[in-house]
Structures are given as structure tokens and as C-alpha cells.
């Protein structure tokens, strides 16, 4: 697995001058993922911050071939590019240059509107890696709730009001849904751990077939956080066990990191984020306790699953 | 035609544009100087920097310039931090936040 | 050209779907991405058997929806592949978002499409409401009268769409069940002849070039969107000449000539019917029968609806005194069907123009017979000398 020096020694495949907000959490997912891929690569992006910030004509931040067609279909579009490559190589119309294919989508474009397209592409077995950058809401259109928004977060379509404490529903477990597709590799990571992220991308690319990685990314605007805290915030999501780092190879769950006695209370992570501000008002203690219990239960379940899969038969 | 900074003024005509709305100059966003967005700016101290490159890893705007050098002691290739591209830095402060506290090679100050 | 120079062809019995699938086999696209939908299902199904039997080198992507079918086809075409799909009705509607994107990216995707009513209520039978719904998507639209034309049109559409002066996607339609499932005797070209007619595809750009990486599908702001739309509009206009050229070349080689419109016994006609698709076949029989009675009647078949043959229609209609436009869909504008309003607009600036009435017919597969068409010609014969046009938009065969 590549060191930071090795990653930094290469020419950047995704450059600055894009229009994402200061302190945005997703651009380094692109930078680091692409740095971890040594072979020629085609990137397909879904509509969203990813596309509108990086390719305002005639500006483009991409130094690799990049295609955007619409919002809900980066997986399907990427599957077409991959099929074309396989076909053209097979018929001798294109050279076999070991081209690899990566599709990017935000949580709205992946958990919600693009779920069907993603499901189809994974089931069909295309040799592509789908990377979801998950900042937990439709940030590009102005912080609307998505299937990835955590319970009780404040968003513009599930706002905190006199009778509602933000989004009532629990965040979807996308990695688990992808595991259900029987694909060879699924992983969950964060934008704020370069080593875990690039290791997982490298591992994914060593496998032929469909791969899926979901990456938690901070959105300072949507989370109402300080721009300099972007990296720390995803690390705290891991340390609180809200967002554990793990991978699933051929259906076997494996924990990438266990905070053990460094596990922090969820409230420590939440209190840095304006979207959870209301949870710290008197009278809302029960809500905090409820989501802490939920995180603890999910963490225990995940650990049990990983322990089960690590047992030698 | 070749594309230069002068083309980025929104003046290209119908006949000058490549077919299909494609763009053929990779990385052309560097023509856009997002550096003027910032209210704070990072100051990098090359003397203190140990080139751990954590700032490089987490800069959302790819602003850390690196250079491949030969480490004379080990004879191996090394990569050194060569400072910040302020033309594109938006002043988020991530670099200062991730710089190891014992090193503290980056500080934030009011943008000039 | 004399008949002796026409290249020998094979006479076979095929349904419209089989004919289109066979044309696709001869084209041998690099990628086909498709999803089942009545009455177009068979096209992809038959094509899949060609893939399974190694008769084509196509990579078949059996997607989970038509939206993904068009998305994958766009991805494949942007990677420099010759890519096709096929659909109908609700499938076309689900693709609708992606259709203008394929056109704007200037990808010459060819799509056989079987005309079927759109929901609701749900109905699987023929009308043109699906194709008409997508008429402003930047796709060429070629209508077929029968299985022979469906076959010929697919081959020509590939050549037209891939012409560097066009580079637009193309729909080739047949009428659901009437053509798609009707068995006919047709002539097909020898495989090598079909291959050489469509030629080798040379994409204008490809994502599969890491030395010259391109960005495809950028976001345009106010300063570029308009400039990016204009070339598409120009290509649509240019396509008229290319369609004519290809139709003439096809005729010279294979004996069946094609144009933007087909004029049937129009030269001395006083009245005419204007229609698209399979109804033209029925109407031609009526014209023949009425001609034997000495009536000066004719027919104009619009083969290509996009680009709209404004000039050709204006010229063809110039000497007529009355015409009836047959629409197999209603625009729900409160003023008839889309073919009617566009034909009228084509004539608006002409010095000479006939009286024009509109008939909406055949929605949801309602049959159209020769007696009904005869009655329309009767009305046109009276209308040509009448002061008052009467009802402009009428609905044929509805129980009121």
C-alpha cells in the first residue's frame, strides 16, 4: 500500500481552481482516490457538487478523462463506458491499456435517486469502482435531507421546528445494501483518513468486477462546522463509532479500526456541528440518549459480525 | 486552436467550440484564481516543516507544491514540501489544523 | 441506374421487430444496452440470441431500466463505441431525460423504437404519442411504413447519424404490433453489403485516451449554453440534405429510394391526406381505388418528422386545394395533433396553400380502415370548393 510520499510524488489528476466551498470535504477524496490508481482511468461523475464545481465550462479540474451525463445514473453511464472498452478491445478497435473505471456520486445521487442505477451496475458485474462521497444531505441544492442524513440532523426540508427535532428517520445503511449485491468488495471509510481511504481504493482496484466504497465527507456549509475542522470531524465520526471503518471482502466483514478505550461519546462529535445544535438544549437529553444507544447497538452488531467472520472454522 | 488564458473570458464563438460541448484542456480550472476568496491565509515555515505531507493529503484545493528529491543519506527518492500555491488557496485552515502540533509549520493570519 | 445494377438481395419473411433486429446484426454495434418493453421487447431479445450465438461481437448490457439503457448507451458512445438500444412507449418516456443529453453530446446513437400509446390509461397498442412526446429532444425521427422500410431505415439511420455533418442520435420507428409483429416478405442486403453501406464508425471524440484526456458533459453557465445549442440546431438542418443523399444512394444501390417525404400520386392531385407510418400503406390503397373512379386524390407520407421537412412539404402542398393531416396522437393543446400544427406552420408563409383539416385517429391501437379514409377523401373533395372549412380538428372512430 502506497505511502503518502509515493502518492504525492505523482502528478495530480485532479487540480485546484474548482469552486467547492473553502474547507469542502470531498475534493481530497477525488485527489487521493485517483492518486491510488496507477492505471489509466476514466472518471464518471453524477450531477451534484462533484460535477458543478469541477467542470464549469471551459474550466475543468480533471486531468483524466471525465464524463458527466446526469444525476441518477453515474453507475449506469460508467457501465456503458466499461462495456465499450471491453468490446473495443475484444474486437481489436482499441488497445488493451488496462483502463480502469471509477464512478463518483454524492449521497443524494447514490443512496436515493441513483440507487437503482447503482444496484443494476453492481449486479451486472462490470469492472468498475463506485465511490460515494457522503456528506449526509443534498448540499448542492441547499442542504435538503437525503436517505443519508443522520437522525435529528437539521436540514432545510426536515428543519428543526417547534414540534419536530429535524429529520426523524435513521440513516440508510448503504454499505450493507451493497454487500447484499454479492460483489467482491465493499468498504466504508472517511475523507479524513488518507491511509485508510487510499488503501481501500488500492485494494478495490486490485480486484476485477464491481466494487463499492462509501466515504464520509464533511460539508462545512451543511453541517455548520468550522472549515478547519473538516478532517477532524470525520475522524471523530469514526472514534464515536457513528461511522466505523470496515471492509467486506466476498461477504466477510472485517473491521479496519477499533477505537477501543478511545471511543468518544457521540455528543462530542455532534456538539461541533450546528446541524445538531438543538439536541443540546434542555429537554432534548432523551434524543441524544436515543441516538447514542442506536450507535452503540450498531457498533456492537458490527463487531459481532466481524468477530464471527474472523473465526477460523 | 490552442487554448490559452485569453480563451477563458467567455468569448469563444460557436465555430471555435469543440463539438459536443467537450473540453480538451485538462486541468484548465487552474486558470481560475480561487485564492482571492480567502479572508485568512496560511503561512508556511519551510524551516519547521518536516515534509510529512499531511497538509498535502488534506488540502481540498491541491495547493501544496511538492518536489521529488534524492535523499543524499539513504540514496532513495524523497518528496519534499515546497509550500503553498496561494493563487488557489481559499484559506480554509485545514493545513494548519492537520500540521502535527510538535511541528506547527503552518499558521493562519489575516489575508493580505 | 438500370435495374441490372441493383445489388442482389435475399427475400425473407420477417416481422418488423425481426427486420430491425436483423439490421442491427448487420450493423454489429460495439455495445447494445436494452430493457424489455412491449411491443419492442423482441428486438433486444432476438439481438441477444445473435450475441449468444457469436453472430455479432457486441457487448450486450442488460440494464435494469430504460433510463440506464440510454445512460449506458451514452457512456459507451462517449467512449468511442457504436452503441444502440431499442424501446417503446413508457420506456422512451423513462429515457426522456437522457435523450437531449445524447443529442447535446453529439453521439450518433441509433434506436429502433416501436410506436405505442403512452399511459394513462396504460395501453400496449399503437399510436404515436410516445415518439411525439420526444419530438424536441434533438433526435432524428424516421417513421417506417412497413417492415421493409423499418429494415432499410435502420441501416440508413446509422449512416446518417454517424455522418460528421450530422452527429446526432436517431430514432427509427415502426407502428406497434401493426408492423412490429406483422409478418411480411422483405428484401435484406447481403451482410457484407450492409456492412460496407453503413461504413466504419469514426467517433469524433473518445474518453479512452489517457494522453489527451477530455472533459465531457461540463456545466455551462449563461456564457456558453447558447453557443453550445446552436451547432445542434445547425446539424438538424444539415441532416435534411444528408438524409436525402443517403436515401438516394440506397435507392441507386438497392432499388428502394427514400426521401424526407414520399409523394404518392400528388402531381395532379387536388386533395391529399398527410400521414406517418403504417397508415400510409392503407391510404395508398384508398388513393388507388378513388383514382380508378377519376378522383384527383393523393397522399403525402412524412417519413422524417425530425428534422421537420418544412420546404419539401410546402412545395408538395402548393398546388393542392384541400388536405387532411392524420395525427396518431393528440398534443392535448386543445388544437389537434403535432403533425397538424407543424404542417400548418410550414405553410404559413406560402403564397399558395390548401385548406387544411386535422384528424386525430387510432389512439391506443384503434383500427383505421379503408372506409374511414374514403370518407375523409369525400370530405376533402367537398371542402376544395367550399367557402367554409367547417370543423378543423375531428376525431375518427370515437363513440361519442
Image: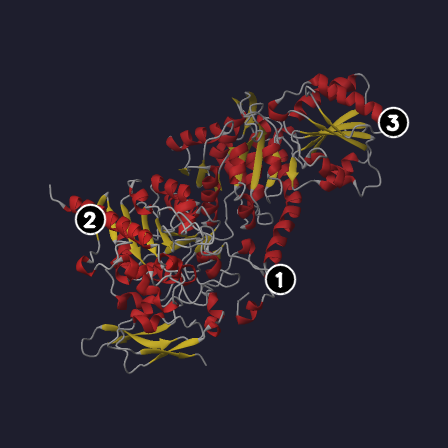
Q: Residues within 10 Å of mark 1 (few under 14, many from 20)?
A: few
Mark in front: 3 vs 1 = 3
> Where does residue C156 sit, x and y in percent of width and height?
58, 37
Mark in front: 3 vs 2 = 2
The residue at which mark 1 appears reads as B13
The residue at which mark 3 appears reads as C386
| The N terminus of chain C lies in quadrant | top right
* Front position in the image: B53 or C280: B53
Q: Given the image, what chain letter belongs to the residue carrying mark 2?
A: A
Tags 2 and 1 touching, CB below 8 Å:
no
- Say what secondary structure mark 3 lies in: loop
* Residue C260 visible in image: yes
The residue at which mark 2 appears reads as A303
* Residue C269 visible in image: no
Position of B90 relative to C367 (above/below)? below
Q: Given the image, what chain letter belongs to the residue carrying mark 1?
A: B
> Residue pushed farthest bottom?
B47
* Front position in the image: C99 or C120: C120
Tell if the residue under mark 3 belongs to the same chain as the one under mark 1: no
> Where does residue A313 sit, x and y in percent of width and height?
11, 41
Which residue: 21% across, 79% down?
B72
Quarter of the figure with residue B106: bottom left
* Front position in the image: C102 or A280: A280
Which residue: 57% across, 68% down?
B9
**Left or right for B54, reference A139:** left
Amino acid at each position: 500500500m502506497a505511502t503518502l510520499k509515493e502518492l504525492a510524488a505523482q502528478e495530480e489528476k485532479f487540480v485546484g481552481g474548482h469552486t467547492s466551498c473553502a474547507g469542502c470535504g470531498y475534493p481530497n477524496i477525488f485527489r487521493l482516490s485517483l492518486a491510488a490508481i496507477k492505471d489509466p482511468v476514466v472518471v464518471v461523475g453524477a450531477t451534484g457538487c462533484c460535477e458543478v464545481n469541477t467542470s464549469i465550462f471551459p474550466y475543468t479540474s480533471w486531468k483524466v478523462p471525465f464524463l458527466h451525463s446526469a444525476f441518477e445514473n453515474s453507475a449506469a453511464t460508467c457501465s456503458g463506458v466499461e462495456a465499450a472498452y471491453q468490446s473495443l478491445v475484444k474486437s481489436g478497435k482499441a488497445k488493451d491499456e488496462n483502463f480502469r473505471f471509477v464512478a463518483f456520486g454524492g449521497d443524494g445521487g447514490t443512496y436515493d435517486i441513483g440507487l437503482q442505477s447503482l444496484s443494476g451496475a453492481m449486479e451486472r458485474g462490470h469492472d468498475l469502482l463506485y465511490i460515494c462521497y457522503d456528506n449526509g444531505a443534498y448540499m448542492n441544492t441547499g442542504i435538503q435531507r437525503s436517505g443519508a442524513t443522520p437522525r435529528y440532523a437539521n436540514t432545510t426540508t426536515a428543519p428543526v421546528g417547534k414540534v419536530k427535532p429535524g429529520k426523524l428517520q435513521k440513516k440508510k445503511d448503504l454499505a450493507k445494501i451493497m454487500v447484499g449485491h454479492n460483489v467482491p468488495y465493499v468498504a466504508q471509510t472517511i475523507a479524513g483518513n488518507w491511509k485508510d481511504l487510499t488503501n481501500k481504493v488500492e485494494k478495490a482496484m486490485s480486484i476485477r468486477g464491481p466494487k463499492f466504497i462509501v466515504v464520509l465527507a464533511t460539508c462545512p456549509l451543511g453541517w455548520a462546522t468550522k472549515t478547519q475542522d473538516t478532517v477532524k470531524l470525520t475522524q471523530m465520526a469514526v472514534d464515536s463509532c457513528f461511522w466505523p471503518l470496515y471492509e467486506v471482502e466476498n461477504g466477510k466483514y472485517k473491521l479496519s479500526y477499533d477505537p477501543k478505550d478511545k471511543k468518544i461519546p457521540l455528543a462530542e462529535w455532534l456538539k461541533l456541528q450546528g446541524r445538531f445544535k438543538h439536541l443540546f438544549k434542555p429537554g432534548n437529553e432523551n434524543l441524544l440518549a436515543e441516538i447514542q444507544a442506536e450507535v452503540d447497538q450498531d457498533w456492537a452488531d458490527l463487531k459481532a459480525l466481524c468477530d464471527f467472520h474472523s473465526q477460523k472454522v | 486552436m490552442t487554448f490559452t488564458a485569453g480563451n477563458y473570458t467567455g468569448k469563444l464563438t460557436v465555430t471555435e467550440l469543440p463539438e459536443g460541448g467537450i473540453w480538451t484542456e485538462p486541468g484548465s480550472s487552474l486558470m481560475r484564481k480561487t485564492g482571492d476568496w480567502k479572508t485568512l491565509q496560511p503561512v508556511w515555515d519551510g524551516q519547521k516543516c518536516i515534509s510529512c505531507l499531511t497538509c498535502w493529503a488534506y488540502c481540498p484545493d491541491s495547493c501544496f507544491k511538492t518536489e521529488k528529491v534524492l535523499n543524499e543519506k539513504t540514496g532513495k527518492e524523497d518528496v519534499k514540501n515546497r509550500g503553498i500555491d496561494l493563487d488557489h488557496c481559499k484559506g480554509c485552515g485545514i493545513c494548519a489544523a492537520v500540521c502535527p502540533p510538535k511541528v506547527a509549520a503552518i499558521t493562519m493570519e489575516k489575508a493580505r | 441506374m438500370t435495374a441490372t445494377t441493383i445489388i442482389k438481395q435475399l427475400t425473407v419473411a420477417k416481422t418488423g421487430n425481426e427486420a430491425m433486429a436483423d439490421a442491427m446484426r448487420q450493423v454489429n454495434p460495439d455495445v447494445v444496452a436494452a430493457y424489455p418493453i412491449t411491443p419492442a421487447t423482441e428486438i433486444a431479445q432476438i439481438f441477444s440470441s445473435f450475441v449468444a450465438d457469436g453472430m455479432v461481437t457486441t457487448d450486450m448490457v442488460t440494464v435494469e431500466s430504460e433510463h440506464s439503457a440510454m445512460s449506458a448507451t451514452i457512456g459507451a458512445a462517449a467512449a468511442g463505441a457504436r452503441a444502440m438500444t431499442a424501446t417503446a412507449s413508457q420506456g422512451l418516456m423513462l429515457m426522456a431525460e437522457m435523450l437531449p443529453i445524447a443529442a447535446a453530446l453529439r453521439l450518433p446513437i441509433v434506436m429502433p423504437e416501436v410506436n405505442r400509446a403512452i399511459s394513462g390509461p396504460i395501453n400496449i397498442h399503437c399510436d404515436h404519442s410516445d415518439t411525439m412526446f420526444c419530438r424536441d429532444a434533438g433526435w432524428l425521427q424516421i417513421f417506417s411504413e412497413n417492415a421493409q422500410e423499418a429494415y432499410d431505415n435502420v441501416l440508413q439511420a446509422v449512416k446518417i447519424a454517424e455522418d460528421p455533418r450530422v452527429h446526432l442520435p436517431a430514432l427509427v420507428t415502426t407502428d406497434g404490433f401493426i408492423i412490429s409483429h406483422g409478418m411480411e416478405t422483405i428484401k435484406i442486403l447481403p451482410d457484407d453489403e450492409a456492412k460496407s453501406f453503413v461504413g466504419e464508425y469514426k467517433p469524433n471524440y473518445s474518453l479512452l485516451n489517457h494522453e489527451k484526456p477530455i472533459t465531457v458533459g461540463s456545466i455551462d453557465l449563461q456564457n456558453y449554453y447558447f453557443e453550445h445549442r446552436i451547432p445542434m440546431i445547425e446539424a438538424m438542418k444539415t441532416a435534411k440534405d444528408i438524409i436525402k443523399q443517403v436515401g438516394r444512394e440506397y435507392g441507386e444501390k438497392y432499388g428502394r429510394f427514400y426521401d424526407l417525404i414520399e409523394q404518392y400520386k400528388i402531381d395532379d392531385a387536388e386533395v391529399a391526406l398527410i400521414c406517418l407510418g403504417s397508415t400510409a400503406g392503407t391510404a395508398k390503397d384508398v388513393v388507388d381505388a378513388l383514382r380508378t373512379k377519376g378522383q384527383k386524390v393523393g397522399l403525402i407520407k412524412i417519413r422524417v418528422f425530425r428534422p421537420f421537412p418544412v420546404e419539401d412539404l410546402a412545395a408538395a402542398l402548393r398546388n393542392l386545394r384541400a388536405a387532411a393531416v392524420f395525427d396518431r396522437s393528440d398534443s392535448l393543446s386543445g388544437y389537434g395533433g403535432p403533425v397538424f400544427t407543424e404542417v400548418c406552420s410550414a405553410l404559413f408563409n406560402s403564397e399558395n396553400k390548401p385548406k387544411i383539416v386535422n384528424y386525430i385517429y387510432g389512439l391506443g391501437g384503434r383500427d383505421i380502415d379503408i372506409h374511414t379514409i374514403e370518407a375523409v377523401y369525400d370530405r376533402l373533395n367537398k371542402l376544395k370548393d367550399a367557402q367554409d372549412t367547417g370543423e378543423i380538428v375531428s376525431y375518427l372512430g370515437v363513440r361519442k
